[in-house]
Amino acid sequence: MENIETALLLLVVGMATVFVILLIVIYFGKLLISLVNRYAPEEVLPAKKDAPRGVAPVPGNVMAAIAAAVSVVTHGKGKVTKVERI
């Protein structure tokens, strides 16, 4: 009976220790994040002022390749309605 009591005591102490260490890691992580955000903020890059471009048309051979790939993948059930450059 004494061995079971010792095992349970070790179990509780071990789990409590792990729990406390994880709490310490979480709170130090939050502290570190707040300090970094306060003293070393991310640089704000100026927005580029390019002239707005119109949508360039997709070449016919590329559109045909895309449509063929969609048809193969969807077994003829898919349809390409619009292709945009991101």
Image (cartoon, helix red, strand yellow):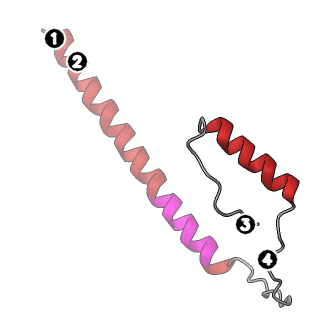
Which of these two is toward me, 12 or 34?
A: 34
Say which quarter of the image contains residue 5: top left
Which of these two is toward me, 24 or 29?
A: 29
Residue 84, label in figure:
3
Q: Secondary structure at mark 1?
A: helix
Q: Horizontal placement of 12 versus 21: left or right?
A: left
> Mark 1–mark 2 contact, CB under 8 Å?
yes
| Residue 31 forms part of the magenta stretch | yes
Q: CA distance from mark 4 to mark 1?
A: 79 Å
Looking at the image, how many numbered discs can be counted on the residues?
A: 4
Q: What kind of secondary structure does the magenta stretch mostly adopt? A: helix
Give the residue number, with chain letter if any, for mark 2: 6
Q: Label 2 is placed on what type of residue?
A: Thr
Q: CA distance from mark 1 to mark 2?
A: 6 Å
Say which quarter of the image contains residue 21: top left
Q: Horizontal placement of 42 versus 18: left or right?
A: right
User: What's drawn in magenta, residue-wise?
Assistant: 27-37
Q: Secondary structure at mark 3?
A: loop
From the viewer's perspective, is residue 68 above or below residue 54?
above
Give the residue number, with chain letter if any, for mark 1: 2
Q: x%, y% of residue 78?
A: 58, 46
Q: Secondary structure at mark 4?
A: loop
Q: Label 1 is placed on what type of residue?
A: Glu
Q: Residue at x 81, y 88 (%)?
A: 52
Give the residue number, with chain letter if any, for mark 4: 55
Q: Horizontal placement of 52 versus 21: left or right?
A: right
